[in-house]
Image (spheres, grey):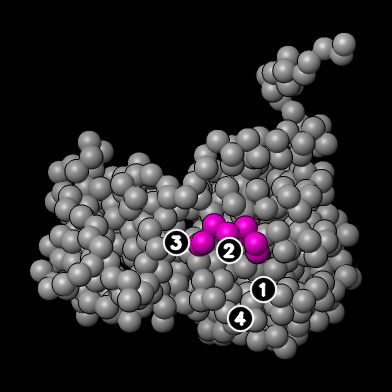
Amino acid sequence: MHRTIIRNGFVLSMDAHLGDLPQADVLVEDGVIAAVGPALDVGDAEEIDAAGTIVIPGFVDAHRHAWQGALRGILPDCSLDEYLAVVLGPLGGSFRPDDVHIGNLLSVYDAFHAGITTMLDWSHINHTPEHADAAVDALRAGGIRAVYAHGTAGGPEWWAYSDRRHPDDVRRIRDRSFSAGDGLLSLALAVRATGHATPDAVKDDFGLARELGIPITLHAGFRVTGYPFTHVLDLRELGLLGPDVNYVHCTTMTDEELQLIADSGGSVTVTPLVEMNMAHGAPPIGRCFARGLRPSLGVDVATSGPTEMFTQMRVAMAQSRSLECPQEIDVPFAPSLGVRDVLELATIGGARTLGLDDRIGSLVPGKDADVVLIRADQINTMPLTDPVATVVAAADTSSVDTVLVRGRVVKREGRLVDFDRAKLLGEAERSRDFLLAVAGMTPDWLARRQEASVPEPA
Ligand SMILES: [Zn+2]
């Protein structure tokens, strides 16, 4: 048996019964949390010194398109309209399986760097079966816990009132990559909503997921110019609402639609920074809370924003408070969303959305050891007074000291483990160069550098 003891951290278990433990240890045995408490007497175990750190469950990123990892920052000023036209158009259309693999691998290490131990990879880049295999293989090679949500390809033939059915290849993928069940990867179906696909196609796609017994996740209720989406009302009409459905964004949904999600037992995921920056509409965080829905958080796309949860937590909090703040000068303001609420959304809340809360999301004996140590003695986090505030209001990715996924250390003392930075950077640059060139998007500075580095013909 392999035993690891994480010693003397300020443990935020995110569990109502265990609570916060100002100086405590976490004992891990073969990847599973065996005990949490002060001064554990454990005998022989590998020791991780957690003094000066806050120990939390790994962050859960409930919505990301990992394949876009190498497209970081290419569209920082775009609207959702432009994003759909470009990223699901010429850029996405040019992806080769290797590009998917590199994007996903970059996203996995990027996640570890940021203390994200679980992500839902919403993968709509499946031009061929090899594209899907490349995505899954990269998630497995990187060693992250992931829900691989198999989607279609991009492109108008799939996304503009399409009559095509979701690729049946998902059955092969299940048999190839998910039959053994290694405990870290699971399968979901990333389906299209009405408007993207015809009602009959949506019905068949939901039917496919339910026949396979896997969860459904879909983009629903967001602003695209000229498309007055009423996704949830449509799904009710089709009789498709259910507790197995995860709705992403929900920024233009009416209260009635949010109530239908709550009543049907579905889940909501918001990606606050991207939704606000790219004009999806306002993240419905407060409106969800008012209906007992606790929206999980996702980073969504590297093309337009940072890919970590600190930003998402802070933006979620600031946005909901900004909407709540009374206009009347005589009415005092008391925020309904606090730092502990958003830390819950980013940990146990995400686990609930992904149906993994029996395995992860809080630090309690019996759950898998997905654990993150946040430095509380850095210049940007010191001095430690309120550990939840330190994590949510002060820390950033430079504060993420050590990260474990099911007991395996993937980041130690600020450095990624088993990570060849130069190799991945070279691969990411080559992939990006190819994709931008095909799409005619190479910036001038890069084109000049590429020309300069090409040797003159003899
Ligand atoms: Zn998305």
Q: How far is mark 2 from mark 4, CA to CA?
A: 13 Å
Task: Examine the rendered structure and indicate whether residue 416 appears above or below residue 146.
Answer: above
Q: How far across and down, in percent of the image, does residue 48 sit?
A: 24, 57
Comes first in the chain, label 4 or label 3: 3
Q: Amino acid at mark 4?
A: Ala
Q: Which residues are magenta?
A: 136-144
Distance between mark 4 and mark 3 Cα atoms: 21 Å
**Where's residue 256, x and y in %?**
57, 75
Crowdedness near tag 1: few (<14), some (14–19) or many (≥20) residues, C-alpha within 10 Å: some
Q: Residue at x 45, y 53 (%)?
A: 112
Q: Which mark is first along the chain, 4 or 2? A: 2
Disc 1, ligand 1: is the CB inside 8 Å? no
In percent of the image, x 57 and y 84: which residue is there? Answer: 243
Report the mark closest to the observer, 3 or 2. Answer: 2
Judge by depth and name the residue closer to the eye, 66 or 335. 66
Single out the mark in the foreground, 4 or 3: 4
Label 4 packing within 10 angstroms: few (<14), some (14-19), many (20+): few
- Can the viewer see residue 148 in this picture? yes
Q: Are marks 1 and 2 in contact (CB under 8 Å)?
A: yes
Give the residue number, with chain letter if any, for mark 3. Answer: 117
Residue at image mark 4: 180
- Left or right, 408 with reference to 86: left
Give the number of the disc on residue 140: 2
- Residue picked out by circle 1: 177
Query: First in sequence: mark 1 or mark 2?
Result: 2
Circle 1: residue type: Ser
